[in-house]
Image (tube, rainbow, N blue to C red):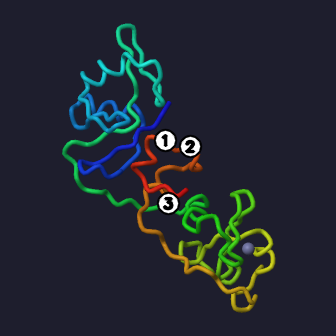
Amino acid sequence: MSRTLVLNKSFRAVAVADWQRALTLVYMGLAEALDEELTPYDFPAWVEISSNWVEAPGGFVSSTRLRFAVPEVIRLVRYDRIPLREVAFTRHNIFARDKHRCSYCGKKKSTDELDLDHVLPRSRGGPHEWDNVVTSCRPCNLKKADKLPDEAGMPLKVTPAKPRWTLLGCLVPHPRKDIPTSWKKLLSVEA
Ligand SMILES: [Zn+2]
């Protein structure tokens, strides 16, 4: 079922929770459910209002007695810090860091047309780490082969580095189209 965006007390997005966890937080009074206008509801109020809804983007929880919506967004009522999270070193996150652009020719490509390139080739001891791995299109990757950018005459257009924490980079492991509409205004989502 669906995921819920978790905001801190200051309405900053801090996490993505599965719906069970989200509802538990609201049930325990640690968070409030927000509707599309960001109107807050405690658990009884949320159950009451959303039980009348015909549709809910996040779906419904149903039991024999109750039926209410899964909130798409909740707000922690006490928590005001923004937890920093390590961005996982994955193919997806490297492409996201480099905005799906080849680091050599600068062309933007879809995920299945991109490869990872080790700036200092692995065959020459290059580490598999954030500052040595860049997004590359297939033709550039083939052309560069086991050379350094200088040797291949292919200067890097970016300086690869470990990204600072980003919510989208580490928590939403899907293309942008999968991000619920209600989240977009709360996240700085690039068009
Ligand atoms: Zn390229």
- Residue at image position (26%, 28%) is 27
Residue placed furthest toward the top: 64
Q: Is residue 103 left or right of residue 190?
A: right
Q: Amino acid at mark 1?
A: Thr
Of marks 3 and 1, the one in the foreground: 1
Which numbered disc, 2 or 3, marks the residue that appears first in the sequence? Answer: 3
Estimate the x, y position of residue 89 in percent, counting from the top left.
53, 63
Residue under circle 1? Answer: 181
- The residue lying at 52 percent from left, 58 percent from top is 190
| Residue type (three-letter) at the residue carrying disc 2 | Asp
Please provide percent x and percent y for residue 64: 39, 8
Q: Pointer 2: what residue?
A: 178
For residue 34, above or below residue 191: above
Name the mark on residue 52. none
Of badges 2 and 1, the one in the foreground is 1
> Measuring 71% from the left and 77% from the top, which residue is drawn there?
105
Q: Which residue is mark 3?
A: 88
Residue 81 lies in quadrant: bottom left
Query: Which element type, helix, strand or loop, lies under badge 3?
Result: loop
Which is nearer the eye, 132 or 19? Answer: 19
Of residues 152 and 53, the one nearer the viewer is: 53
With 121 as the anchor, is 163 left or right in this view? left
Q: Is residue 42 above or below residue 104?
A: above
Q: Nearer the viewer, mark 2 or mark 3?
A: 2
On the image, which quarter does residue 32 sit in? Answer: top left
